[in-house]
């Protein structure tokens, strides 16, 4: 393989730049020409493709976001969009791709390979940590630390005013950010989409807290929680508790997506970027590079897309025990 391209797609995640750097510097090391594609699949369709050198990725290992920009492309999901993208890749002589993103990205890459035979190796870039085939995704650790910093600050006010706070963290279909930031932040309750937590259970936990003279409580709710958003959860709690509650809701939102990546995310991203590149060079295709038990592994896209990554029941049990 003489010429490859790298792109970021889907939601940005801290550490994506460190991953791009690893792909580019790895390619230079191995004597392969490397191109960058801006704005994910949209850039592939529009030919927004440029040659990268070692210098193109100087001074980015510490930066959040992605220098290649990102997008969720609707056009690439159409056969016409993929035909245009293929035409552009042919024009640039690109033989293989490294895709940094999540399952939407890998679904597109699989369709593209079936139609045009261009191999892709993925690196898991999403704050949600919802990808089967890796213990952690790029950006997750930073997002958890960002959420935790916010929870710690909110706890000061919860304690000073004897309040209940319902805090919503990101995770469209996944409770990983919620469970980890909740445990680290000493939350009284964590609600995740993977496990049903009836409001009555939340109310019981809060009431038991009152009985034990707890004056403040924190409930962390994942965005994709079945009982609804943090606002809806707060409304449901109010309806089930007779006492007047001093309760506030905070939605952390996109602050969790940005910022300086942690050391862990930079190292993981570097390892997975180089792993994806070297996998591609060694003939891997339609697989995602991941780290499981500290070993680099390749998992077929069909599995990362299809298989769930459940949250350990142990962690949920721990929240209950430790909040007593
Ligand atoms: O997948 C990452 C993520 O941040 C989710 O946690 C969240 O639901 C979604 O992206 C938000 O996407 P957007 O930035 O497009 O609104």
Image (cartoon, rainbow, N blue to C red):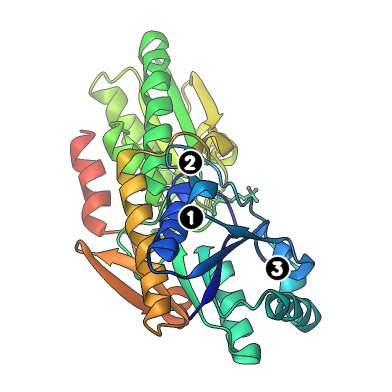
Q: Are marks 1 and 2 in contact (CB under 8 Å)?
A: yes
Q: For the residue labelled by badge 1, is the local secondary structure a helix, a strand or a loop?
A: helix
Residue situated in front as seen by the camera: 221 or 240: 221
Q: Which residue is mark 3?
A: 44
Query: Can residue 117 be spotted in the picture?
Result: yes
Which label's residue is closer to the chain start, 1 or 2?
1
Q: Which residue is mark 2?
A: 60
Residue situated in front as seen by the camera: 174 or 47: 47
Q: For the residue labelled by badge 2, is the local secondary structure a helix, a strand or a loop?
A: loop
Q: Is mark 1 within 8 Å of ligand 1?
A: no
Kindly identify the residue that appears in the image at 21 percent across and 45 percent down.
318
Name the spot of residue 78 as percent of width and height, x first. Answer: 76, 79
Kindly identify the residue that appears in the image at 75 percent across and 67 percent down.
74
Which label's residue is closer to the chain start, 1 or 3?
1
Q: For the residue labelled by badge 3, is the local secondary structure a helix, a strand or a loop?
A: helix
Kindly identify the residue that appears in the image at 68 percent across and 56 percent down.
39
Residue situated in front as seen by the camera: 61 or 157: 61
């Amino acid at each position: 393989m003489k010429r490859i391209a790298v792109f970021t797609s889907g939601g940005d995640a801290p550490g994506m730049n460190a991953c791009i750097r690893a792909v580019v510097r790895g390619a230079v090391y191995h004597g392969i020409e490397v191109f960058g594609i801006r704005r994910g699949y949209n850039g592939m369709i529009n030919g927004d493709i440029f040659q990268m050198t070692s210098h193109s990725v100087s001074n980015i290992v510490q930066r959040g976001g992605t220098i290649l920009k990102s997008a969720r492309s609707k056009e690439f999901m159409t056969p016409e969009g993929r035909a245009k993208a293929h035409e552009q890749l042919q024009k640039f002589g690109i033989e293989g791709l490294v895709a940094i993103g999540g399952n939407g990205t890998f679904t597109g890459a699989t369709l593209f390979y079936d139609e045009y035979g261009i191999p892709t190796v993925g690196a898991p870039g999403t704050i949600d940590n919802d990808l089967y085939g890796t213990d952690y995704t790029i950006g997750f650790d930073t997002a958890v630390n960002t959420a935790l910093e916010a929870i710690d600050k909110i706890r000061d006010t919860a304690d000073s005013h004897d309040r209940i706070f319902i805090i919503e963290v990101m995770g469209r279909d996944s409770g990983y950010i919620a469970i980890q930031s909740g445990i680290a932040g000493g939350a009284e309750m964590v609600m995740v989409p993977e496990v049903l937590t009836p409001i009555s259970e939340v109310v019981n936990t809060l009431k038991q807290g009152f009985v034990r003279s707890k004056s403040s409580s924190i409930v962390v709710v994942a965005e994709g929680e079945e009982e609804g958003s943090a606002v809806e959860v707060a409304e449901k709690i109010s309806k089930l508790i007779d006492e007047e509650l001093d309760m506030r809701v905070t939605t952390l939102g996109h602050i969790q997506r940005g910022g300086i990546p942690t050391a862990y995310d930079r190292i993981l991203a570097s390892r997975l970027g180089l792993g994806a590149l070297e996998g591609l060079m060694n003939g891997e295709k339609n697989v995602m590079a991941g780290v499981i038990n500290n070993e680099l592994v390749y998992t077929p896209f069909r599995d990362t897309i299809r298989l769930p990554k459940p949250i350990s029941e142990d962690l949920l049990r721990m929240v209950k025990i430790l909040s007593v």
